[in-house]
Amino acid sequence: MNFPSLPPSASDPSATALMGDPVLLRALRDDMSHSPHAVLGAHPAVFAEQSGVVVRAFHPDAIACTLLLGVEARPMLALGGGVFAVFLAQAKLPLAYRLRFGFGNGSTWEREDPYRFLPSLGDLDLHLIGEGTHRKLWTVLGSHAQQKGSLVGPDRLRFDFTSPRALTPEEITKVEDLVNQRTLQNHTVQTEVLSMDEARARGAMMIFEEKYGDVVRMLSMGESTELCGGTHARATGDIGLFKIVSEQGVSAGVRRIIAVTGDGALAYLRDVETNFAKVVSLAKATPANVLDKVEKLLQHERALEKQIDELQRKLATGGGGGGLEALLAKARDIAGVKVLGVRTEVTDRAALRELAEQLRDKLGQSVVLVGSVADGKAQLVLTVAKDLTSRLKAGDLIKNSAQIVGGSGGGRPDMAQAGGTELARLDEAIEAIYASVG
């Protein structure tokens, strides 16, 4: 981005805040990587002893931009390359505003950005997580918990930190409690621009210290003091509720917390309440006894699954009619090998394998293929007596049958499985085992 060679008039608050602040200028340069038509956000600034923010906007083709605050229109300073900025005192910060871009042909385009000042809530929460970005994690996990990255949104935040293990539910609760306790204290956020040496002397927490220049921005909120160039709320109480919704590993030795704040936390809790109410209704329970009711339902489901397994095995043993003996009688002798292909009503794959093994063991030197339909698909299990695997491989024998039902299969020399979608050809696939062996 090409900045003007001469700074704008010093009487312009926006110009003074921007051109005199290398931190803001570096942030503006970095933000040029954003996509077109993007509002770039706001950074804290101090002008004439007033704290506020510099609002920034970007459109690659615009030659002018105006910030619309209700009936008030504030022309924005053109910094070149389609970037515009204006200073707003903190006491006048709105929650919503519009941007009007002007173009060389006289046309205009407006964009409403009602949440641009709200990222301050998440950014401030990053500080409160640790009383200097991560000290609260130190309190809970120990000094090994070091920040590795973060991302701030209007009502949510992401915080990466080093840890060899996952946080326990109790530790997550403790971090939430520590942050929310500080939030309720409603400390005013003080913003100062000062030298790095002075900030260090005053005990400011510095993360990624190598990225700081000679002039830095220092935030103070109660006992917490830290360097940061992000957007911030006017007081910690503006954050509202802080709620961790996810904690997971992202790489070796690095964990990630995702949390919601303000309206985001409220929306999250309402979703939880809605889902909880649905569970209560489905379980025909009350909020007070729903846990006990769900536990009983799960126990009942496990008992039913056990009964189904037992019935599947009984069905396999009975062969769906006439018992195993009736099935064994269908075996054919092909080149000294007993070959059997049967269809059964057994749907459980484990029970199907058990049936195939029982038939093989009863027949001795044999090849057995059993098939059935389960969940809208044909399934096949083929077994070969171990003494025959030197010349008859289960994985090879099942391929032809698998192709007939429109699928594929494979396995060990003595056991192979296959599946397919051509249900109408299942009997044909089972019959094909005789030709495959012969």
Image: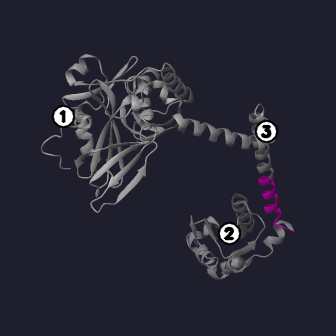
Q: Is residue 320 magenta?
A: yes
| Placement of 166 over or under 394, stated as above or below | above
User: For this view, does 421 lie left or right of residue 247?
Assistant: right
- Eye-nearest disc, 3 or 2: 3
Which of the pair 240/329 is nearer the observer?
A: 240
* Labels 1 and 2: the sequence-earlier one: 1
Highlighted range, magenta: 308-321
* Labels 3 and 2: the sequence-earlier one: 3
Residue that extends furthest to the front in the rendered view of this protein: 71
Could you give the CA–CA distance between mark 3 and mark 2, rounded to whole angstroms?
A: 33 Å
User: For this view, does 316 lie left or right of residue 259?
Assistant: right
> Which mark, by number, is residue 296?
3
The image shows residue 232 at horizontal and vertical percentages of 39, 31
| Placement of 132 over or under 426, stated as above or below | above
Q: Which residue is mark 1?
A: 10
Which of the pair 270/94 is nearer the observer?
A: 94
Numbered disc 3: secondary structure = helix
Kind of residue sitting beneath label 3: Lys
Magenta stretch, main secondary structure class: helix
Numbered disc 2: secondary structure = strand
Number of other residues with Cα within 10 Å of mark 1, as a class: few under 14, some 14 to 19, many 20 or more: few
Asked where in the image residue 317 lies, by quadrant, the reply is: bottom right
